[in-house]
Image (cartoon, rainbow, N blue to C red):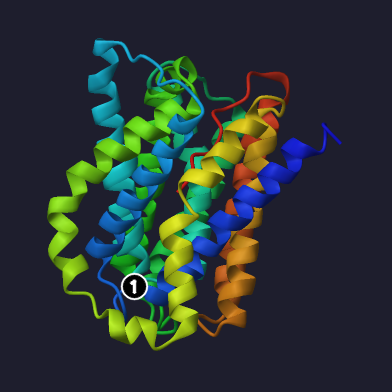
């Protein structure tokens, strides 16, 4: 059972992240402005991150690391959340979930650029294949046949993936140095303070009566405010204690599959044959890169939402 728990944790956290895409898409613009949702979700996550202080002593952070926490909060808290929210407000949940799977490829590029990793023939082939599929998905946003998807929305989701890659490579030593509860607390408390002044007006001007009139929207909004950020990251870091990062990368394939199933079932999007083809190309490319790590050190684990 103890060997099964980390895999159950990975299954649960990736399922939660998969539901992000259709649920965010359901509430954005029609009910909640992206700035309001970014700010509100960061504030809720910051409050949740304080709860562990009830049973654990606050970990001391070295003064030199505080600047790193501010940079991490700006990157992972403010920028990634903003790109994700504004991107999903202007594209389909299916396209968004597929584009987000290129994170391991972007991690590879950045790691090689910084001298942390090196290219092999298999990695180069996988990178070219995967990125070609991602670019194809982005470009379909300009196609009249994809009415629910928009080019610039897809670009923002790609930028979101790029931010995740930068965070994983540049801040991996910081994450390893402190408890995960400490890392999440500092990142999201700082990010909430940074973002709240920009989103406060939109939070106040939100039509709560309209939201309250539809129970489906209420539950979707509560889910995206409470669930996607803090709890899955705890589950991910718990799993990483006994599961190789390469295995966690494989579990990310569940996200677009579940996101597609839920989006179609809820009537938020419809599946296109070309989208399935491009997704398969991305999966094959990422799979080739992950396969190359069987005899080499594993790549960083994927970041959460």
Q: Nearer the viewer, residue 176 or 213?
A: 213
Quadrant placement of the N terminus: top right
- Residue 271, compared with residue 124, is above or below; it is below
Asked whether 298 or 291 is in front, the reply is 298
Instruction: Tell me where residue 48 appears, x and y as whole percent.
Output: 42, 45
Please tell me which residue lies in front, 29 or 212: 212
Along the viewing direction, whichever of 161 and 89 lies nearer the viewer: 89
Provide the secondary structure element on which disc 1 rests: loop
**Quadrant in which residue 40 is drawn:** bottom left
- The residue lying furthest to the right in this view is 1
117 to the left or right of 265:
left
Indicate the quadrant where residue 34 lies. Answer: bottom left
Q: How many marks?
A: 1
Q: Is residue 74 above or below residue 23?
A: above
Q: Position of residue 120 (x, y in %)?
A: 59, 25
Q: Is residue 131 left or right of residue 258?
A: left
Left/right placement of residue 60 relative to residue 67 reads right
Residue 221 picture location, percent across and down: 42, 69
Q: Is residue 157 visible?
A: yes
**Which residue is located at x 30 percent, y 50 percent?**
43
Tell me: 85 left or right of 115: left
- Relative to 289, residue 174 above or below: above
What residue appears at the point 40 percent right and 83 percent down from the top-left corner?
Answer: 147
Residue at which label 1 appears: 28
Looking at the image, can residue 128 be seen? no
Q: Residue at 56%, 82% (x, y): give it.
A: 266
Q: Pointer 1: residues within 10 angstroms few (<14), some, or many (20+)?
A: many
Residue 214 location (% of width, % of height): 43, 86
Residue at (31% x, 31% y) in the render: 72
């Amino acid at each position: 059972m103890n060997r099964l728990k980390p895999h159950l944790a990975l299954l649960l956290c990736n399922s939660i992240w998969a539901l992000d895409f259709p649920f965010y898409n359901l509430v954005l613009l029609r009910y909640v402005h992206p700035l309001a949702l970014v700010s509100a979700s960061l504030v809720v996550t910051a409050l949740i991150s304080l709860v562990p202080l009830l049973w654990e002593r606050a970990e001391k952070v070295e003064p030199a690391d505080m600047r790193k926490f501010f940079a991490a909060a700006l990157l992972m808290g403010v920028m990634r959340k903003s790109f994700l929210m504004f991107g999903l407000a202007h594209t389909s949940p299916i396209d968004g979930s597929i584009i987000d799977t290129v994170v391991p490829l972007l991690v590879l590029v950045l790691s090689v650029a910084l001298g942390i990793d090196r290219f092999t023939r298999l990695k180069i082939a996988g990178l070219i294949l995967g990125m070609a599929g991602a670019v194809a998905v982005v470009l379909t946003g300009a196609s009249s046949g994809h009415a629910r998807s928009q080019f610039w929305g897809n670009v923002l989701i790609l930028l979101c993936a790029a931010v995740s890659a930068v965070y994983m490579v540049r801040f991996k030593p910081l994450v390893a140095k402190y408890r995960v509860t400490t890392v999440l607390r500092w990142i999201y408390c700082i990010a909430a303070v940074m973002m709240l002044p920009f989103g406060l007006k939109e939070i106040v001007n939100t039509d709560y009566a309209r939201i309250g009139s539809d129970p489906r929207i209420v539950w979707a909004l509560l889910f995206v405010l409470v669930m996607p950020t803090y709890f899955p990251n705890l589950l991910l870091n718990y799993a990483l204690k006994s599961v190789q990062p390469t295995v966690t990368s494989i579990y990310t394939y569940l996200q677009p599959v579940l996101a597609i199933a839920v989006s179609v079932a809820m009537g938020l999007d419809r599946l296109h044959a070309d989208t399935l083809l491009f997704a398969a190309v991305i999966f094959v490319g990422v799979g080739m890169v992950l396969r190359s790590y069987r005899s080499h050190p594993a790549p960083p684990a994927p970041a959460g939402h």
